[in-house]
Image: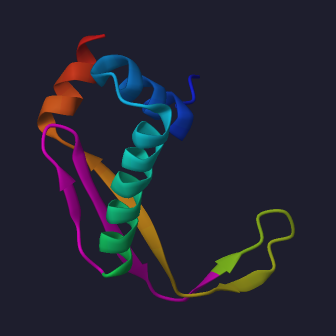
Amino acid sequence: MATISRIDLANALRNRFGLTAADSYRMIDIIFDEIEQSLVNGEDVKIAGFGTFKILSKSARIGRNPKTGVPAVISARRVATFHPSNDFRKTISVK
């Protein structure tokens, strides 16, 4: 499994466009901050050709501890989801 860090993304920008290290790191931070703020504000984030990030609100429910079987309350929460675009799905299904 490959992990791509912010540093890897910044280095790709630096190498591809000749940016300084500081500028490329700043650009990556700005992009992720914009995505994060949009999601926090309840907005979907669609990146054309890649996919859509959404926030889903899950209500509280009763679950069970898988080890003991004892019922437990699972609290209400908001979770981030990602749905790949059709182009992205086609790209990854070919390989």
Residue 90 or residue 21, whichever sits in front: 21
Residue 46 or residue 29, whichever sits in front: 29
Q: Quadrant of residue 5?
A: top right
x, y (%) of residue 95?
31, 10
x, y (%) of residue 12?
40, 24
| Residue 67 seen in this snapshot | yes
Task: Provide the residue span drawn in magenta.
Answer: 42-62
Reply yes or no: does residue 54 show up in magenta: yes
| Left or right of 55, for residue 69 | right
Q: Quadrant of residue 41?
A: bottom left
Q: Main secondary structure of the magenta part?
A: strand
Residue 41 vertical placement versus 34 (above, below): below
Reply yes or no: does residue 2 show up in magenta: no
Residue at x 81%, y 79% (from the top left corner): 70
Residue 72 vertical placement versus 21 (above, below): below
Residue at x 53%, y 87% (from the top left corner): 76
Residue at x 39%, y 18% (from the top left corner): 15
Residue 58 vertical placement versus 19 (above, below): below
Residue at x 43%, y 49% (from the top left corner): 26
